[in-house]
Image (cartoon, rainbow, N blue to C red):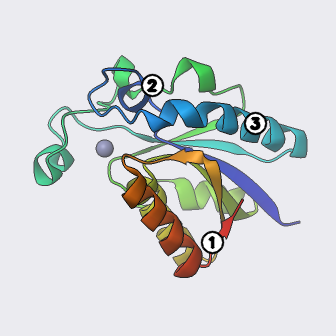
Amino acid sequence: MPKEALLIMDMLNDFVLPGAPLEVPETRRAIPAIKREIQRARREGNPVIYVCDAHAAEDKEFSRFGWPAHAVKGTAGGRVVDELKPGPGDIIVEKTSYAGFYQTRLDDILRDLGVDSLRLTGTVTHICILFTAYDAVLRDYTVTVVGDGVAGIDKEDHDAALRIMKNVLGAKMV
Ligand code: ZN
């Protein structure tokens, strides 16, 4: 039976809390929508999967792309925000790049669960959400983007990413 998984990307203290190293203020606006999606997934018996940055202290992502250090594995900054704390049975997948599938267990986990479609929430819309959506489509997953559950850094990039996912990747927008 076709099954959908809810993906919650990078809703970590280092992206969400005011003053955090990679603060994306819009993430705080997205929290109620993501809570709603978690409730929906639980009601429908769908898996809830947190896809989270877990960087080495001197990860090459920081110097290569000019990001401040963030979400270092094992630090409080790398933990999912309290409001969206994973429940028992939820799955956490650690990643070290923008793409949720790259060198992670995500694809194996989804296939083991019989998942064939993904519902994307979290941050950042034009970075991790976009690059994960592309990888998902390449792997034949149906992709749905939850409009009020994704958060961008600025509106222009956010809107562009939504357009690209809809028009180029064929993602459904809800
Ligand atoms: Zn990162």
Give the mark, 1 or 2, whose residue is nearer the N terminus: 2
Q: What residue type is labelled 1?
A: Ala
Residue that numbered label 1 is attached to: 171
Foreground mark, 2 or 3, reads 3
Residue 19 vs residue 42, the one in the foreground: 19
Looking at the rendered structure, the number of numbered marks drawn on it comes to 3
Q: Spatial distance from mark 3 to mark 1, Cα to Cα? A: 20 Å
Disc 1/disc 2 C-alpha distance (Å): 28 Å
Q: Mark 1 vs ligand 1: CB under 8 Å?
A: no
Q: Which of marks 3 and 1 is nearer the N terminus?
A: 3
Furthest-bottom residue in this view: 168
Residue 85 visible somewhere in the drawing: no
Side of 125 where 33 appears, left or right: right
- Disc 3 residue type (three-letter): Arg
Q: Is 161 or 1 nearer to us in this picture?
A: 161
Q: Is residue 160 above or below residue 9?
A: below
**Residue furthest to the front:** 156
Give whichever of 34, 159 is nearer the camera: 159
Label 2 sits on residue: 79
Q: How crowded is mark 2: few (under 14 residues within 10 Å), some or many (20 or more)?
A: many
Q: Which amino acid does the dot numbered 2 rest on?
A: Arg
Residue linked to disc 3? 36
| Disc 1 and disc 2 in contact, CB within 8 angstroms | no
Q: Quadrant of the C terminus?
A: bottom right
The residue carrying pointer 1 sits among few (fewer than 14), some (14 to 19) or many (20 or more) residues within 10 Å by Cα, namely: many
Residue depicted at x 10% and y 47%: 63
Q: Report, in whole angstroms, how far the alpha carbon at label 2 lies from the one at label 3.
A: 20 Å
Can you say whether 138 is above or below 3 in the image? below
- Residue 84 shows which numbered tag? none
Looking at the picture, how far across and down is residue 27, in whole percent? 49, 35
Helix, strand or loop status at disc 1? loop
Give percent across and percent down for residue 104: 44, 54
